[in-house]
Image: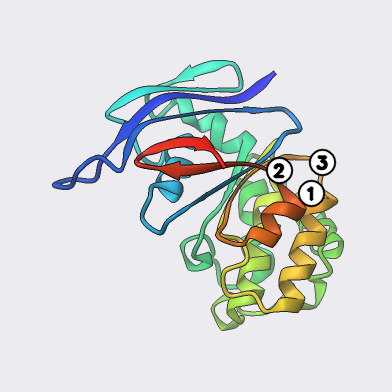
């Protein structure tokens, strides 16, 4: 089953030419697909359209077998597709790491005890338990990046949408992240300039060119 089917998406920010000019792609269950392209070519915009944070001027978004048009249509999408933002500060807003990771499960209706069990399970799996009680805004950029991934994984999404996930990561933590992603069961759509990461995590690739997606 196709998790996402994007057909002819057109989108432009106010007062600017359209950044997407007919972008289309299909992401199947279990598939790992990467998108490369120049800065400002529309890669991050595409991910935000997929979860309803932006609205296309034209084109169709189908997610999990249904057309998605209005904001209520995307509530289910955001439960089932986890977007890890390019800037962790756009994602992390709670006082501590544990609260940030628990936020999603609590929002999905889990009780406090079950949510904290989920927090411990995810932090343990990612070898981040030492950060559990840390103040989030005092973490390093690399630590914030890994905690952002933990916060998304705690919601047990079916697909991960990753926007430049190695930003702010040193070589050691970038290697850890790659190993983590290789071991996950979810489908992945990976946006990154890092050719080595694309080869290791999502070797099937597309390139954003002139507002459209073409084979890399």
Q: In what quadrant of the picture does the C terminus appear?
A: top right
Q: Which residue is mark 1?
A: 114
Vertical placement of 190 versus 68: above or below?
below
Label 1 neighbour load within 10 Å: few <14, some 14-19, many 20+: few
Residue 76, given in percent of the width and then of the height, sits at 56, 29
Where is residue 117? Give x, y as percent.
Answer: 82, 55
Q: Mark 1 touching mark 2, by CB under 8 A?
A: yes
Query: In the picture, residue 127 is in which quadrant?
Result: bottom right
- Please tell me which of labels 2 and 3 falls first in the chain: 2
- Tell which of 58 and 197 is nearer to you: 197
Callout 3–callout 1 Cβ contact below 8 Å: no
Report the residue marked by disc 2. 110
Q: CA distance from mark 1 to mark 2?
A: 6 Å
The mark that comes first in sequence, 3 or 1, is 1
Secondary structure beneath label 1: helix
Q: Is residue 216 above or below residue 72?
A: below
Q: Position of residue 92 (x, y in %)?
A: 54, 64
Q: Position of residue 46 (x, y in %)?
A: 44, 41
Quarter placement of the N terminus: top right
From the viewer's perspective, tell me whether residue 114 is left or right of residue 54: right
Q: Residues within 10 Å of mark 3 (few under 14, many from 20)?
A: few
């Amino acid at each position: 089953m196709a998790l996402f089917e994007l057909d002819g998406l057109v989108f432009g920010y106010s007062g600017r030419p359209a950044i997407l000019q007919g972008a289309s792609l299909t992401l199947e269950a279990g598939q790992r697909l990467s998108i490369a392209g120049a800065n400002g070519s529309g890669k991050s915009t595409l991910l935000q359209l997929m979860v309803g944070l932006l609205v296309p001027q034209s084109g169709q978004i189908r997610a999990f077998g249904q057309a998605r048009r209005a904001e209520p249509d995307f509530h289910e999408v955001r439960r089932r597709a986890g977007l890890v933002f390019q800037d962790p500060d756009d994602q992390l807003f709670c006082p501590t790491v544990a609260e940030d990771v628990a936020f999603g499960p609590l929002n999905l209706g889990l009780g406090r005890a079950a949510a904290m069990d989920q927090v411990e399970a995810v932090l343990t799996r990612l070898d981040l338990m030492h950060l559990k009680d840390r103040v989030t805004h005092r973490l390093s950029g690399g630590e914030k990046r890994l905690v952002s991934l933990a916060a998304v994984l705690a919601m047990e999404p079916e697909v991960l949408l990753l926007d430049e996930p190695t930003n702010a990561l040193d070589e050691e933590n970038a290697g850890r992240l790659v190993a983590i992603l290789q071991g996950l069961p979810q489908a992945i759509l990976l946006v990154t300039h890092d050719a080595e990461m694309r080869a290791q995590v999502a070797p099937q690739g597309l390139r954003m060119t002139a507002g459209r997606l073409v084979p890399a």
